[in-house]
Amino acid sequence: MRRGASDHQSDDMDAPNLQKLGDSDLYGLLGCSKFATSEQIMAEYRARVRDCHPDKTSDNGSEATKEFQKLLYAKEVLTTPSKRYLYDMWLTMGVGISLEQWMANKEHVQQTMHWANKAPTPMLKSSETRSATDNARPEWSRAQSSVISAFRSYKI
């Protein structure tokens, strides 16, 4: 099956630009927070891309074109939910590999990083795991006296 021009362009964009970006902050590149919605990311992308769009600049190898490619890659990653999830995971994990390697090994990451989240420890012991000394404590009971009984009965 012959690939279309748009398919070829998007695949070429992913790998080379990722290598050029290195380990940069894609959120910072677009000027948005980690909690920004896709619409907010697109708005920031459009605002920044106006000055460096290839149709607006005359030199193909200029810094503006390189900046455009970085912005385009950041937009692609942050507006695609699966890529954004992997990018956010890469940011929070603090793993010593590059973003390029992380994205390239996403299938392996799913298989080997499942253990990374520690299971929460229960705050209270279950009734089966309590020790014998826990069960040996006397139960709480009311003090029995005629004065207290009269007080509780509203007689005094």
Image: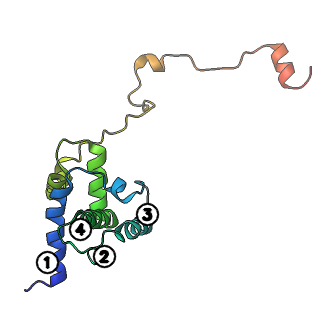
Determine which quarter of the picture holds residue 96.
Answer: top left
Pointer 4 residue: 65
Disc 3 residue type?
Thr
Mark 1 or 4 closer to N-term? 1
Earlier sequence position, callout 2 versus callout 4: 2
Looking at the image, residue 126 lies above or below residue 80: above
Q: Residues within 10 Å of mark 4 (few under 14, many from 20)?
A: many
Q: Quadrant of the N terminus?
A: bottom left
User: Percent from the top left, x then y, of residue 91?
Assistant: 29, 48
Q: Are marks 2 and 4 in contact (CB under 8 Å)?
A: no
Question: Contact, CB < 8 Å: mark 3 with mark 1?
Answer: no
**Residue 10, above or below 137:** below
* Residue 142 image position (x, y, % from top left): 70, 19
Amino acid type, callout 2: Lys
How crowded is the residue under tag 2: few (<14 C-alpha within 10 Å), some, or many (20+)? Answer: few
**Residue that label 1 marks:** 8
Secondary element at tag 1: helix
Task: Give the residue pinned by disc 3.
Answer: 37
What residue did someone put label 2 on?
56
